[in-house]
Structures are given as C-alpha cells and as structure tokens.
Image (cartoon, grey):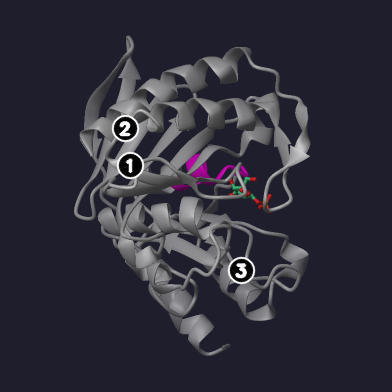
C-alpha cells in the first residue's frame, strides 16, 4: 500500500503543475458517462496511469476517463479505481478540485474497498488517507507531504452540501433538505465533490447529498471512483454513507461506470436521511 501512496504523491506533484500551467480547454472526446473531457482530465489521467503501471502490486485500474479496465499485473494484489481530476471544469474559475482513489481487493465492489485516498488542489494541496479505522490528513509543504492531523466527524454537524438539479428533486428530498436549513444548517456547495466533502469533514460534520432525481434516478456520481471511496472515507472518520436506504457500500455494481444516489455525513444527519427515505421507497 505504501508504494501506491508514494506513486500518488509523485502524480499529485505533476498534476498540480498541470493545473497551474495546463490548457483548461475542452478535448474532442467524451468519457463513458458522456462528460466532455477537458485536456486537464486527460493529462492528469496519463500521469496517474503511468505511475500505477510501474507497480507490481496493482492488478488492474479503472479510470473515470477511460471506458475499460486497464490490466497491469495479473499477480497484483490491488485494484484501483480513480477519478484523476474531479470537478476539473472548476479550474478555469479558480475553484478547488481534487483526485479520488478507491483501492480494492479481489473485485471492484463496495464490499471489497480496503482503502481510499483523495487529494484536494486548493490554496493548499492536501492528501487524506482512509484505512477503515482512521482518517489522516497530510499537507504538501516544500515538496513533501507532512502529517497534519487525524479527522473525526462530530455526531451532528452544521453544514449542508445539497447537490443535483433542485427542480428534479423528489418532494420528500426537498422537504428534508428544507427542514435542515430551517434548523439553522449553513449552505456550503461549490460543485466540486472533493472540496465540498473535505470541508464537511474538517468543519465538524453535516450532510453532502447527491440523490436520485426525476432526471437521474440512479444519481450522477460514479460508484467505483467517487461514491465508494468517499463512503469509506466518511466511515473511517466515524460517519456514515447511504444510498437513502442501505449502507452505500452494499450497493451492487454491474458496470465499472455505474452511478448511485449517495449521502455522506455525520451520524445524526444520515439517520434522518434513512428515516425519510425508508418512508418514501
Ligand atoms: P451538480 C463534478 O462534475 C461532479 O462530478 C462532482 O465533483 C460534484 O459533486 C458534482 O459533479 C456536481 O454536480 O449537478 O450539482 O453540478
């Protein structure tokens, strides 16, 4: 696992440079989910794949930016699914973005995730590593990643990050989100999953939601390299993650680009989500 972390550190330093100096324009391609790929997405993906291909411990990788599984070493122990530069369209308005890595054993399913790592490219570059029991944050300082702190969620938080198109929310979802705001929660939503979830983790908790909607009943966020890594991250910080009914890591995966409705947060907020959604199945 340490060699994977070191590979991600090397890739991160190069991606930071790509963000600062790279072309934020669109490529001529779309990814498997139909998103128009930015040149930054492709450049970041190339860097990460290059570094992972050097590691004999990796069996195969899945990238948001590639249609198919890439086989690395048939005797490798780990399978890695990653989003090389999530929220890349925010770079040209100078907002924070991030990379997300889910590390699995045996197969690409929520039940088989064994670690997650995300990197926030913001005013500071920070890397957060989850092992299922702890969540540890490191900060890039003078070319090195320095340990800063462990992250733990409060039982109840203060922040709400309500994603997706509000006009497509189901009525019970809208009623639930409105009730949180009526209870004094504060809106914190940039449209970048990584900084939005990082903020809730560091500011004591709350709820990030990207539900199923009338236009996207299975949600928008991808299971293997967005939903499951952050579910594992939040559980490692003492929180929870659900699809509205169950632990989101129990959601079945039939295709490597499958999506899932997802809620990540402190226990109090997630328990409310489960209570509301269980009555509106
Ligand atoms: P919406 C970025 O494109 C992304 O995949 C996530 O980083 C983010 O949480 C979500 O989409 C934002 O989607 O529909 O709220 O703009």
- 103 to the left or right of 22: left
Q: From this viewpoint, which residue is outermost toward the right?
A: 28
Tell me how far mark 1 sits from mark 3, CA to CA: 45 Å
Is residue 192 shown in magenta? yes
Provide residue 32's location: percent of width, then percent of height.
Answer: 67, 51
In this rendering, the count of numbered labels is 3
Q: Determine if residue 248 is in view.
A: yes
Q: Point out the tag, 1 or 3, that comes first from the N-terminus.
A: 1
Tell me how far mark 1 sits from mark 2, CA to CA: 6 Å
Q: Which mark is residue 58?
A: 1
Q: Determine if residue 121 is in view.
A: no
Q: Are marks 1 and 2 in contact (CB under 8 Å)?
A: yes
Identify the secondary structure beneath mark 2: loop
Disc 2, ligand 1: is the CB inside 8 Å? no
Q: Are marks 1 and 3 in contact (CB under 8 Å)?
A: no
Q: From this viewpoint, which residue is outermost toward the top?
A: 142
Query: Which residue is depicted at the point 70% across and 70% down?
Result: 169
Residue highlighted by disc 2:
55
Comparing 158 with 9, the one in front is: 9
Q: Which residues are magenta?
A: 190-197
């Amino acid at each position: 696992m340490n060699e994977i972390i070191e590979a991600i550190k090397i890739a991160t330093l190069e991606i930071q440079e790509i963000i600062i100096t790279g072309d934020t324009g669109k490529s001529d391609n779309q990814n498997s989910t139909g998103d128009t790929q930015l040149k930054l997405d492709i450049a970041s993906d190339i860097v990460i794949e290059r570094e992972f291909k050097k590691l004999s411990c990796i069996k195969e990788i899945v990238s948001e930016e590639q249609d198919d599984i890439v086989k690395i070493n048939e005797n490798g122990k780990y399978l890695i699914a990653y989003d090389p530069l999530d929220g890349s369209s925010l770079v040209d308005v100078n907002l924070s973005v991030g990379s997300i890595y889910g590390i699995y054993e045996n197969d690409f399913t929520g039940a088989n995730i064994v670690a997650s790592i995300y990197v926030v490219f913001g005013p500071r570059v920070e890397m957060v590593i989850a092992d299922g029991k702890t969540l540890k944050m490191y900060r890039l300082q003078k070319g090195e990643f320095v340990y800063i702190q462990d992250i733990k969620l409060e039982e109840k938080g203060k922040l709400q990050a309500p994603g997706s198109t509000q006009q497509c929310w189901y009525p019970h979802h809208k009623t639930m989100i409105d009730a949180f705001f009526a209870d004094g929660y504060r809106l914190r939503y940039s449209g970048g999953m990584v900084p939005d979830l990082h903020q809730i983790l560091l500011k004591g908790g709350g709820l990030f939601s990207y539900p199923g909607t009338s236009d996207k009943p299975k949600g928008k966020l991808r299971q293997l390299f967005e939903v499951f890594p952050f579910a594992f991250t939040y559980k490692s910080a003492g929180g929870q993650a659900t699809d509205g009914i169950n632990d989101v890591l129990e959601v079945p995966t039939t295709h490597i680009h499958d999506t899932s409705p997802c809620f990540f947060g402190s226990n109090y907020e997630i328990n409310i989500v489960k209570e509301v959604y269980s009555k509106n199945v």
